[in-house]
Amino acid sequence: MFNFIPKHTIDFEQLWALISSRNRWFISIRYTVAGAMAVFLLVMQYVFKIGFSDEQLWAMTIITASLFLLNTLYSYIDAKGFIKNETDKFNPLHFAFNQIVLDLLVIALVSYYSGGIESPFYFFFVFHMIIGSMILPGAVVYTLSGVSVFYIALVSVLEMQGIIEHHPFGNMLAAPLYDNVRYIIVFVSAYGIMIFVSVFLANNVTSAHYRRSQDLKMTLDKLSQAEKMKMKYTMGVVHEIKTPIVAVQSNLDIILEGYAGEVTKSARDRVYRARARSDEAINIINDVLNISKLKLLENLKKDEIDIIELLKNMYKKRGVQAKTSGVELRISDLRPAPKPVKIDRGLFELALSNLIGNAIKYNTHGGIVETIIEERECDTFVTVADNGIGIPDEDKDKMFKEFYRSSNAKKSGVEGTGLGLSVVKEIIEHHGGAIWFKSPSRLQSEGRKGTEFTILISDEDC
């Protein structure tokens, strides 16, 4: 099978998508052409009284009907997936070549039955060669162009010699031109120059554009690889920073637990503050590590997970933080018949951990954090609501941006990177879901505005 793949092709997926879309465009435009040909025959014969012979009318009617039927077959082939995006099989480029050859045959037959050298339809060869230059290799298009020039010259000579019948374009011309040698030479020469120049220009422009698009794809791939390398480097450096901080925490814990001897109350308070600050540093490091991992993420490992069991484990991990902050944790399952959800456990746990952690962190003593699970049709909704400090209206449009923190969060004295919510959003969108929030929340009370984040998990099998 002929290989029509352009030499500079790097991104085959882009190539197949481009050619497939053009093939579908060919099919849809061909239906219009078949309809236009039928209208043309009726207008020429009955409005302009052009005087086509019965043989011409029958021939062009059969050509039009055949074009419509063959186009329906092409549409069926395209819809049923018989065309494979593989270089060694019948691929979109072979399909495009097949369609272009059919169109050229139709133009050849219509031109012959509508005047031969006198027909205006020969110029549709030029139009088709320009389209062909946008899809097929230059050598193939030049060959087809040469065949069309040879065909016009051959038919003209055969008609002039009386070897084949000449079908005039009705009564349009006062005198025939098909037997005029000078006219034939001028027409064929002009047509040949026009079609080869048109193909040369179209092919050069298309080839240059295609090479640039492939170069751009290669550059983007290199940038993507560089970004991944940068992320891996960042993860390595940040992880190394984490190690000494953990060591500092261990020493602080030894002091607080009294293993290093008696510590005065004033010193103990300062050690507690140092321990709290080291926790904040670890949280910041974890945020940076998590966002870096997400940037490197390519595939999800989805499993059927019991969301309640996952939440209970999450609350257990956040128990100390909640107790220290004086915040009550609740779970409300409002589903009529609880069922597992298909998610990547590790990533979803990270998303919920961020939301629940924020709900505790930006709450006040005596506050509430409630996670509500609901089900509507096939979709599962997980809402993390609190009655904490809330989010000011002027900050709401920016909350999912990386490194952004609301104005009241900064004033609260609680440290953070502003990466947590962007991580959550990216995880949920990787799952094909959505996340939004509102403030005040359903738990708002006097002096407690609160916020609630809702996650949508779609059931792919529904």
Image: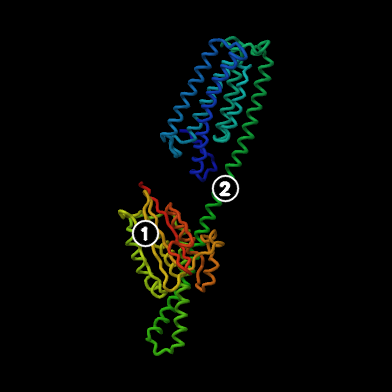
The residue closer to the viewer here, 16 or 281, is 281
Image coordinates for residue 134, horizontal then vertical, percent = 57, 35
Image coordinates for residue 403, horizontal then vertical, percent = 53, 64
Q: Residues within 10 Å of mark 1 (few under 14, many from 20)?
A: some
Quadrant of the rendered image containing residue 282:
bottom left
Image coordinates for residue 287, horizontal then vertical, percent = 47, 66
Rounded to the nearest angstrom, the CA distance separating label 2 from label 1 is 39 Å
- In the image, farthest residue toward the front: 446
The residue located at (59%, 39%) in the rendering is 207
Above or below — where is 408 with respect to 271? above
Above or below — where is 9 with respect to 109? below
- How many marks can you see? 2
The residue closer to the viewer here, 341 or 13, is 341
Image coordinates for residue 216, horizontal then vertical, percent = 57, 48
Question: For mark 2, what is the residue?
Answer: 215
The residue located at (68%, 16%) in the rendering is 183
Q: Secondary structure at mark 2?
A: helix
Q: Amino acid at mark 1?
A: Arg
Does residue 378 appear to the left or right of 97 in the view shown?
Answer: left
Q: Quadrant of the N terminus?
A: top left
Q: Secondary structure at mark 1?
A: helix
Quadrant of the rendered image containing residue 180:
top right
Question: For mark 1, what is the residue?
Answer: 345
The residue located at (46%, 71%) in the rendering is 240
Q: Nearer the viewer, mark 2 or mark 1?
A: 1
